[in-house]
Image: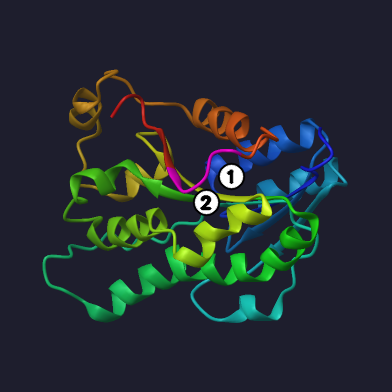
Amino acid sequence: MGKNLKRFLISGASSQIGIELIKKLLINNYEVIGLYNNNEKKLSILKRKYKKLKTYQINFENNSINNYKFSKINCFISLQGYLNNSNNKRMDENDLIKHINVNYIKNLIIINKIIPYMKKKKYGKIFLSTSVGTKFGGGKNTLYYSISKFLNEYHPSYLRELIRYNISINTISIGLVNTSIHKKIKSKDLNKRIKLTPAKKIMSVSEISQAIYDLIVTETNIISNQIVNLTNGE
C-alpha cells in the first residue's frame, strides 16, 4: 500500500462485484467505506472479520445521502445500479428520472463531498461505472438503465479540471459478467449474448473484480477523463 491510497469509498458495496472488490482491498490492508441499499448479510460477515471496513445503509432513491460526510477519501468507486426491467417501449418520465437520480446524480453528490479533502492532499482517484450495453443503445428492458449509466461517461468540465490537483476521474465500462442481474431479465438469452462477444465467453465476478482492483490501486495518476473498457474485447 502506497502513501496516497489508504481509504476507498465504494457505492453498490453489497453487489456481487462490490463484495469481491471489497474483499480484495481488505485482504491487502486498505480501509474501505461501503455504501449499500440492501443485502447487508455478506457485508456484515466481512465487518466481523475486518476492522478496516465501515458500512452505511443509504437509500439512493431519496436524498438521505445529504446527511452523510465522508472524510479522508482517497479513491471513490461507484458500482450502484438501479434497474427496473419492465418493458420500456412507452416512455415513463418518472422512471427514467429515478434511474438517472440513482445511477448518476448521486455520484455527483458524493464527488462534491470528497473533493475538498482530495484537493487538500493534492491526490485523488474517482471511478464511475458504466455498462457495455451503452455501446449498443441498451435493450428494450434495460433502456433507462443504459441511458443513466451512459451519463457516467460524461465528465463535466469542473471534474476534468481536477487533474490540476492530481485528482483523476475515469469511467470503467463493465462487460458481460455472470452476475445475478441477468436472471431478472426473463427475456434475455444469455447464451446468445455470449456468442456476440469477441472472446465468446462471459467473465466471472472474480475476474472482473480483480481487473477493477488492479486498476484502482495503481498509485500513478496520469490517466484521466477516459473510459477504461473491461469488456472482453467488445
Q: Are marks 2 and 1 in contact (CB under 8 Å)?
A: yes
Mark 2: amino acid = Leu
Neighbor class of circle 1 (other Cα within 10 Å; few <14, some 14-19, many 20+) is: many
Residue range corresponding to the magenta coloring = 222-226
Q: Nearer the viewer, residue 216 or 11?
A: 216
Question: Residue 79 got which mark?
Answer: 2
Q: Secondary structure at mark 1?
A: helix
Q: Quadrant of the N terminus?
A: top right
Q: Say which residue appears at 43% left-offset and 39% top-offset.
A: 179
Q: Separation of disc 2 and disc 1 at Cα?
A: 7 Å
Mark 1: amino acid = Gly
Q: Secondary structure at mark 2?
A: loop
Q: Say which residue appears at 69% left-offset and 65% top-offset.
A: 114
Farthest top residue in view = 199
Instruction: Measuring from the top left, give residue 99's x and y in whole percent.
Output: 36, 68
User: How many numbered marks have been drawn onto this rendered protein structure?
Assistant: 2
Instruction: Measuring from the top left, give residue 94's x and y in whole percent.
Output: 29, 80
Query: Where 152 falls versus 231 (above or below)?
Result: below
Instruction: Measuring from the top left, give residue 88's x and y in whole percent.
Output: 17, 65
198 vs 37, left or right, is left
Farthest right residue in view = 51
Q: Quadrant of the C terminus?
A: top left
Q: Nearer the viewer, residue 185 or 171?
A: 171
Neighbor class of circle 2 (other Cα within 10 Å; few <14, some 14-19, many 20+) is: many
Q: Say which residue appears at 21% left-offset and 42% top-offset.
A: 188
* Lower position in the chain sequence, tag 2 or tag 1: 1
Q: Which residue position is annotated with label 1?
A: 18
